[in-house]
Amino acid sequence: MHCKVINPILKYAHKTANYRFFRALLVTVLFLTFSLPFSLQAQENTLQKLTTAERSDGKGQVIRFHLAQAVDSFQVYQPDPDLIQLTLYQENIDTADINLPNISSAFDEISFYDIPAGIGVDIYITEGKFYDGKAYHDGNSNDLLLGLTETEKSELEYLTKDTEPIIWSSFTITEQNLLEGNGNTPSENSDYNQTRDKMKFDVVVIDAGHGGHDPGSIGYRNVQEKNIVLEIAKKVGGYINEYMPEVEVVYTRDSDEFIELEERGSIANDAEGDLFISIHCNSHTTRQPNGTELYFLGLERSESALEVMKRENKVVRANNDIEQRELSQEELLVYELANSSYITASEQIAGMMEYQFDERAQRHSRGVKQGRFVVLYHASMPAVLVETGFISNPSEARYLTSDRGQSYIASAIFRAIRNYKESNGN
Ligand SMILES: [Zn+2]
C-alpha cells in the first residue's frame, strides 16, 4: 500500500507491538468501506422510468414501470374514478432517479411513497377520462404493466364506490395485502425467463383442426375439413422429419380424434414448443370465395375475419351440440401485454407463410389477418392459424383433397418454418 494517508498509520502501527493487530483492523475497515455499499446496491431494485403507450385496440393506454428486477407482488386499488393506487411489494425499490413521461393523455400526476416492504403509487387520471386499471407482470421483462381500459363513467363510479383511498403515511402491511397481491413470484418469473433464454428452435407443434365428432367445415360434395387438415399436418411433419431432423415434431392429434381447444395449447406448452401451427380450411355460404389466409392472435378488423374467428372457435360436441367459444377483449389485452414478443414473431412467421403460398405455391393469398382464436390463446409461443383454402369452392375443394394439392400446401408451410428458423439464427 502506497497511499499517503495509509502509510503514516502503518509507520505508527509498525512502532507498536500491536502491528499485526492494526494491520488486520485496517484490512477489515477497508474491506467494509469498499464492499458494503456494493452489496447493498445489489439488493436495490431501481424503478428507472415510466413510459406510456396507446393500446393496440385504441381502447385505452398501457403504463409500463421499467424495473431492474420483477417485484414480488403488486396490487391495484381504485378508490375514485380519477385515482388509481398501486402497491409494489419488494424491499429497496429505488424511485429517486425515475424518469417520468413529459406528456400523457391518461394522467396528470403520479407520486411515489415508501411503505413497509415496498412502495405505494398514486396516479391521478386526467379529467374527463375514465379508466379501469389492472396490472400485469410483463412475460418478457421485469417490468410491471398497468393496463388502463376505457370504461363508462357510471360503471366506474359504481365499481369504486366501496373503496376508500389509501393514506400512505398510515399504511400498514397486513397478511391480507400480501395474500391479495396478484403477481407471480419472482422465482416463477425467473424460471420463465431462463426457459426463454435457453430457447433453441427445436420443437414445432402441428395442430390439425377439429377431429372426431367435430368435422369442422363441410365443403363441396361433403368433404370434411377435419380429414383434409390431418393429411396436410402429417405431410408438414414428414417434411420436417426429413429435411430438419434436428427439429422435433409434436402433433396435437395424429388420428381422427376430438381434442379440446385448450388441450391443444397444453400439449404445445408441455412439449415446450417453439412454434404452434394450427391448420384449417375455410368455407363460405357461396362457392366463389377462394384463397389462403394467415392469422395470428389479435383483434379482428374485418367482417370476414370475424366470421372465420367464430367458425374456428366453434366446437361440435359428441351429442352434436354446438358450443361457441369466446375470447374477450380483456383476455386478449392480457395476452398482448404478457406476450408482445410472441405476437411479433407470430406476425413474422405468418408473413413468411403468406409469401410461400402466394409466390411459391401460386395460391391466391387473401393476406395476413388477426383474430381472437381460442386455440392460439392457449399456446405460450409464437402461434399462427393457417386457412389453407375454401372447401366450399369446388376447384379449391378438389385441390385440397388431392395428394398433389396437399403436398403443395404442406411444402409451402414447411418452407416458411425453415425460413423462420434460419432467420432467427438457428
Ligand atoms: Zn377449422
Image (cartoon, grey):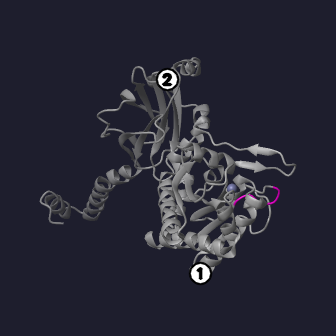
Q: Residue at x 29, y 55 (%)?
A: 34
Q: Find the magenta span and give its range.
A: 209-213
Q: Nearer the viewer, residue 302 or 191?
A: 302
Secondary structure at numbered mark 2: loop
As drawn, 90 above or below 162: below
Question: Are there few (<14), some (14-19), or many (20+) residues within 10 Å of tag 2?
Answer: some
Q: Residue 199, image x and y in percent? A: 52, 67
Say which quadrant the N terminus sits in.
bottom left
Q: Nearer the viewer, residue 119 or 278?
A: 278
Of helix, strand and loop, which mostly describes the magenta segment? loop
Mark 2: amino acid = Ile
Horizontally, residue 17 falls left or right of residue 396, namely left
Question: Are there few (<14), some (14-19), or many (20+) residues within 10 Å of tag 1?
Answer: few
In the picture of the structure, the residue carrying the numbered disc 1 is: 245
As drawn, 4 above or below 312: below
Quarter of the picture for ligand 1? bottom right
Horizontally, residue 353 falls left or right of residue 407, namely left
In the picture of the structure, the residue carrying the numbered disc 2 is: 166
User: Residue 271 occupies which quadrant of the picture?
Assistant: bottom right
Mark 1: amino acid = Pro
Q: Identify the mark nearer the N-term, 2 or 1.
A: 2
| Mark 2 vs mark 1, CA separation in Å | 59 Å
Q: Nearer the viewer, residue 414 or 225?
A: 225
Q: Residue 55, image x and y in percent? A: 45, 39
Check the image and name the residue furthest to the left: 4
Q: Residue at x 26, y 58 (%)?
A: 26
Q: Residue 411, image x and y in percent? A: 58, 74
